[in-house]
Image (cartoon, coloured by chain):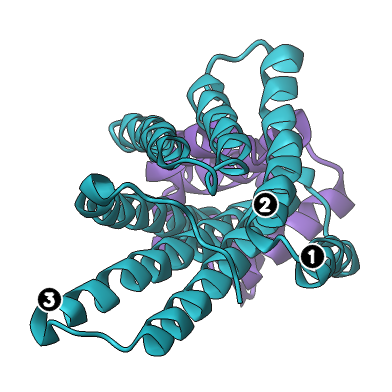
Amino acid sequence: MSKKRERLEVIYDILKAIQEKNGKIKPTHILYKSNLSHQMMNEYLKELIDGNFVIEKQDKKGKTYELTQKGFDYLNKYKVIVEFVESFGLS
Amino acid sequence: MISLYTIPLWFLNYTIILGLVFTIITLLVGLYSIKIYKLSMQKQSKIFGVGFLFIAFSYFIKTLMLLIPFSKLHIERIIDVSTFSAWTSLGAYLHILFFLTGLITILYATLNVNNFRLFSLILALTIIPLTLSTLKLQAFHILASILLIYITGHYLMCYLSYGTKKNILVFLAFLSLLFVNIDLIFSQHSGIYYVLGDLLSFIAYGLILIKLILITKK
C-alpha cells in the first residue's frame, strides 16, 4: 500500500513545489523540494509531462517546468484521490 | 440451454427495480474510478473502473432480460415460448460473462501487477470451466465466489496490515457479495434464495454507494 501512496505523494510534492513558485520552477528546485534522486526526478517529470500535468519550457537560462490545468486539478483533488485509492484498496 | 433462477412472482417487479439500482451504483463507481484515473494517472483506478463498468453492463443486461419478455407479454398478451427461452438464455449468458469479467478485472486491479498475460490466464481459467459445465448457473456462482474470496481477502489484508478503517465498508460490501454468490448456488431450488441474494446485494451495493458518497464529500 505504501509504495503507491508514495507515488501519489511524490507527484503531489513536485506539483506543490511548482505551485509555490508561482507555477514555474527550475529542475534544481524540484530536486531539492521533492527529495528524489536525479534519475527518479527525471522519471517522474517525464511521467508528468506525458500525462499533461506539467509542461517543459526551454529558454536562455535553461529548462523550467510549469503547471497545466490538469496539474492544478491534481493538487485541488489530491485528498479525494488518496481517499478513493486507499478506500478501494488500489494502492 | 441455461437453467435460470427461481424467482417468486411477487418479487419480479422488485428484482427489476433492484437490477436498475445495481446498474446505476456500479456505473457510478466505474465512472468515478475512471475520473480518478484521469486526475491521477493511477492505472489501478482505471482497471478497477473498467471492472465496475463490466458489472454495470451485466446488471443492465439481466434487467433487460427480465423486463423485455414481460413487457412484451403485457402488450401482446401472448408470447412465443421458444422466443422467450432464447431471449432469456442469451441474456443470462451475457450477464454471467460480463459479471465474471468484471470480477476478474477488479481482482486484477487489487493484485497491483502490470501483466496482461496474468489477466488473460485468470479469464481463461474462469470462462473455460464455465463453458464446459453442464450446470452453468451453479458453476457461475461457484466461480464468482472463488474470485470474491480473493477480492475480500485483499481488503481484509489491507485492513489487518495497515490498520486503516478506510476500506472496512468496501470489505463488508465484497463480503456480502461473496455471501450472495454462495446463496445463489442454491437459487434453483427455492425462490427464497434468490430474494435473499437480492437483499444481500442491496446491502453490498448500498455500502459501496455510502463509501463513494463519503469520498466525494471530502
* Residue named by callout 3: B74
Placement of B155 over or under B133, stated as above or below: above
**The chain drawn cyan is chain what?**
B
The tint chain A carries is purple
Graded by Cα atoms within 10 Å as few (under 14), some (14 to 19) or many (20 or more), the crowding at tag 1 reads few
Q: Earlier in the sequence, mark 3 or mark 1?
A: 3
Q: Residue at x 40, y 43 (%)?
A: A77
Q: Residue at x 30, y 35 (%)?
A: B213
Toward the viewer: B94 or B32?
A: B94
- Residue B147 appears in the figure: yes
Q: Are marks 3 and 2 on the same chain?
A: yes
Callout 2: chain? B
Disc 1 to disc 2: CB gap under 8 Å: yes
Picture coordinates of residue B191 (x, y %)? 41, 42
Cα separation, mark 3 vs mark 1, equals 35 Å
Picture coordinates of residue B147 (x, y %)? 73, 45
> Is B211 left, or right, of A27 in this rendering?
left
> Is A70 left, or right, of B172 in this rendering?
left
Picture coordinates of residue A28 (x, y %)? 72, 48
Q: Quadrant of residue B87?
A: bottom left
Q: Earlier in the sequence, mark 1 or mark 2?
A: 1
Toward the viewer: B110 or B88?
A: B88
Q: Quadrant of the C terminus of chain A?
A: top right
SS label for mark 1: loop
Q: How many marks?
A: 3
Graded by Cα atoms within 10 Å as few (under 14), some (14 to 19) or many (20 or more), the crowding at tag 2 reads many
* Residue named by callout 2: B138
Q: Residue at x 30, y 50 (%)?
A: B15
- Checking the image for residue B133, the label placed there is 1
> Is B194 left, or right, of B45 in this rendering?
left
Query: Mark 3 is on which residue type?
Result: His
